[in-house]
């Protein structure tokens, strides 16, 4: 199958040698998004809630380039620098995925790029 690179100007540029997303068949694999403001190129907020909100907004922007939405997301992985932030991120996440939420894993990591507190990756299908 052919892979198609998905890129959105409304989401932050990749900060390394990777694509924002790759579409293969009917499935799009979205790279992890931090709470980076796409215009400023830096973390948008010091709070984990604000960063989670921006990360999901960034995922939405990339999904839109693939003619998809959060409704198409079937799996996410959330990376947190502190499990103490789980409840806050869960509340923000739940405000976006209100019906039939995707499968999900949440893991704690030692650190994230640019000092981020949360990163979210996703897989979506048509």
Image (tube, rainbow, N blue to C red):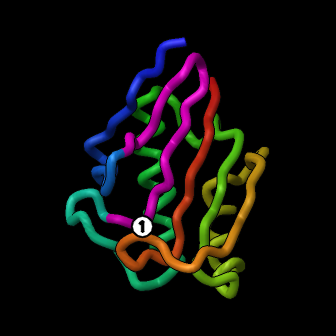
Front residue of 106/63: it is 106
Above or below, 2 relative to 99: above
Quarter of the rendering occupied by the C terminus: top right
Front residue of 2/72: it is 2
Q: Is residue 7 left or right of residue 109?
A: left
Q: Which residues are magenta?
A: 18-36
Quarter of the rendering occupied by the N terminus: top right
Which residue appears farthest toward the left when viewing the image?
Answer: 40
Front residue of 22/124: it is 22
Residue 53: image location, x then y, percent: 49, 66
Q: Is residue 54 left or right of residue 89?
A: left
Residue that badge 1 annotates: 35
Residue 102: image location, x then y, percent: 74, 46
For the point 32% across and 39% down, the residue is 8
Residue 39: image location, x then y, percent: 21, 59
Q: Residues within 10 Å of mark 1 (few under 14, many from 20)?
A: many
For the point 74% across and 54% down, the residue is 104
């Amino acid at each position: 199958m052919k892979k198609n690179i998905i890129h959105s100007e409304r989401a932050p540029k990749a900060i390394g040698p990777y694509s924002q997303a790759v579409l293969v068949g009917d499935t799009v694999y979205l790279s992890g998004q931090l709470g980076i403001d796409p215009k400023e190129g830096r973390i948008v907020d010091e709070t984990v809630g604000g960063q989670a909100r921006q990360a999901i907004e960034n995922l939405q922007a990339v999904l839109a380039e693939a003619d998809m939405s959060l409704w198409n997301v079937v799996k996410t992985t959330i990376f947190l620098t502190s499990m103490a932030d789980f409840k806050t991120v869960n509340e923000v996440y739940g405000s976006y995925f209100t019906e039939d939420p995707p499968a999900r894993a949440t893991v704690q990591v030692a650190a994230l790029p640019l000092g981020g507190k949360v990163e979210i990756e996703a897989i979506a299908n048509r």
